Amino acid sequence: MILLIHQPPWRPNHIYATGFPLVIAPSTNNGLSGNAENLGRLLNRRNYYFVPFRQDNPITKPRSIVFDFESLIRTIEYALDGEQISPILL
């Protein structure tokens, strides 16, 4: 789930020009393998904020991650203040 907090009109590079936060709530089966590099790149970018996430099921799905739904609203509030909620990894 990706939430873009913005004011219309939205253009592809609008986030860079205005500084509106992009909140990312990762939930994927390969977040700790193939997508780990991409997540790491986004963690280093400005205006990208992550909802805290954890490993889904270490036994049956060792590379799967899911976001913490209970932290979603709080993450958005922090993102509007320009801060990343901590910790990101639960």
Image (cartoon, rainbow, N blue to C red):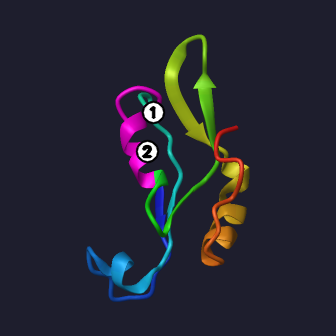
Q: Residue at x 50, y 73 (%)?
A: 21
Q: Quadrant of residue 82?
A: bottom right
Q: Secondary structure at mark 2?
A: helix
Per the rendering, the mark at residue 31 is 1
Instruction: Give the residue at the far top of this rendering.
Output: 59
- Above or below residue 42? Residue 23 is below
Task: Spot the residue most to the front.
Answer: 44
User: For the residue carrying disc 1, how many other residues have a C-alpha within 10 Å: few (<14), some (14-19), or many (20+)?
Assistant: many
Q: Establish if 33 lies above or below 42.
A: above
Amino acid bearing label 1: Gly
- Residue bearing mark 2: 39
Mark-to-mark CA distance, 2 and 1: 8 Å
Residue type of the residue flagged with mark 2: Leu
**20 left or right, relative to 54:** left
Looking at the rendered image, the quarter that the C terminus falls into is top right
Determine whether label 2 and label 1 are within 8 Å by CB: yes
| Label 2 vs label 1, nearer the camera | 2
- Residue placed farthest to the left in the image? 12
* Badge 2: residue crowd in 10 Å (few <14, some 14–19, many ≥20): some
Count of picture labels: 2
First to last magenta residue range:
31-42
Q: Earlier in the sequence, mark 2 or mark 1?
A: 1
Q: Within the magenta stretch, is there residue 80?
A: no
Give x and y (percent) for residue 5: 50, 75
Q: Nearer the viewer, residue 28 or 43?
A: 43
Residue 6 place in picture, x, y as percent: 46, 81
Q: Assess whether residue 32 is covered by the magenta stretch.
A: yes
Position of residue 20 in the picture relative to residue 85 (left or right)? left
Position of residue 49 in the picture relative to residue 52 (left or right) = left
> Which x, y percent locates residue 75?
66, 62
Q: Position of residue 57 (x, y in %)?
A: 61, 21
Q: Which quadrant holds residue 78? A: bottom right
